[in-house]
Image (cartoon, rainbow, N blue to C red):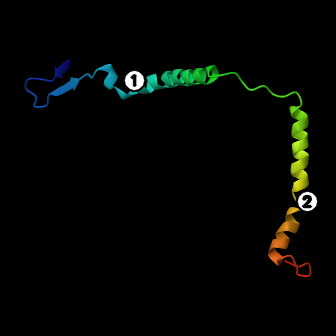
Amino acid sequence: MSAISGTKTGTAVSISTTRPWWKEPYVWMVIAGPLSAVLACAVTAVYILQGPDAVVSENAYQEGIELSRQVQSAQPPMQPAQTGRNHSATGGRKDVKP
């Protein structure tokens, strides 16, 4: 489909051609949003239908508290940021002021 416009006496003749809809980039930009949502929905459905969720044990909260206590007892006690900074600046000597 092409349309020719112009005058017989003029030297310039403009030809405008229309492209099919699938060759227009804006059409694909409009289609891309809903298509990505459908694709994400399909991926989520496959992920959900692969198997049931794991069962949480009855005493999971107590196990978490016990694990937290073990980690806290394994770490050295924390010190204030200014003390740590001064310690790194002086090499650990207490008689030197930073």
Q: What count of labels does the image hold?
A: 2
Q: Secondary structure at mark 2?
A: loop
Vertical side of 63 occupied by 39: above or below: above
Name the residue nearer the viewer: 89 or 70.
70
Residue 54: image location, x then y, percent? 74, 26
Quadrant for the C terminus, please. Answer: bottom right
Quadrant for the N terminus, please. Answer: top left
* Left or right relative to 31: residue 75: right
Q: Amino acid at mark 1?
A: Val
* Residue 63, quarter of picture: top right
Residue at figure coordinates x 53%, y 20% from the top left = 38
Vertical side of 79 occupied by 38: above or below: above
Kindly identify which residue carries mark 1: 27
Q: Secondary structure at mark 1?
A: helix
Q: Amino acid at mark 2?
A: Pro
Name the residue nearer the viewer: 84 or 54.
54
Kindly identify which residue carries mark 2: 77
* Residue 78, quarter of picture: bottom right
Residue at figure coordinates x 87%, y 57% from the top left = 75
Mark 2 to mark 1 CA distance (whole Å) = 62 Å
